[in-house]
Image (cartoon, rainbow, N blue to C red):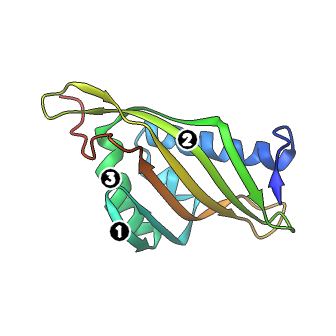
Amino acid sequence: MYEFDKNNQDHVSIKSWFKEWESFVINKNFDSARKLFDKDVVSFGTWMDVVQGLNNLEKKQWKSIWPNISNFCFLTDTLFIQFSPDKLLANCVLIWDSIGYNPDGVKFKRPGRATVTLQRTSFKKSWKAIHTHLSLNRTVPQKTYGVK
């Protein structure tokens, strides 16, 4: 089922999930971000092939990227959600943006897109990511070196 009503409670809760994750990325708060993810999450992205497990995701993706970017944001107005019939599973697609840095410290725009699959065990439980794929747009430099 596609979700078009952006004021729907389920849509709002997922938008809030992304805003919370965004704040953890901005603040490089790895420990707090972990609570948003299932321990067996399966992911891939710019800096890693497919990995399973939250520890691998943090080590191989988050810690390689978050300290080296700034101004990260999910553009939640672009959020598109497909819910399972029972609304306990949600496939989410949206655009994100950030600033990267060349080796000499010169900034560049670093836009990308994300697909995130969220799951909850009941309507009273929080959403947990069971799959993530964040990738840069074509022609965006793959490496960012952080603020100099």
Instruction: Tell me where residue 58 sits by quadrant.
Output: bottom left
In the rendered image of this protein, does residue 94 appear above or below residue 98? Answer: below
Regarding mark 1 in the picture, which secondary structure is present there? strand
Q: Which residue is mark 2?
A: 95
| Type of amino acid under label 2 | Ile
Residue 28: image x %, image y %? 40, 42
**Quadrant of the image for the C terminus?**
top left
Closer-to-camera residue (123/94): 94
Give the CA separation, mark 2 to mark 1.
21 Å
User: Mark 2 or 1 closer to N-term?
Assistant: 1
Q: Residue at x 21, y 39 (%)?
A: 145
Name the residue tied to disc 1: 49
Q: CA distance from mark 2 to mark 3?
A: 21 Å
Residue at image position (32%, 40%) is 140
The quadrant holding residue 86 is bottom right
Residue 14: x percent and y percent? 71, 48
Rendered image quadrant of residue 126? bottom right
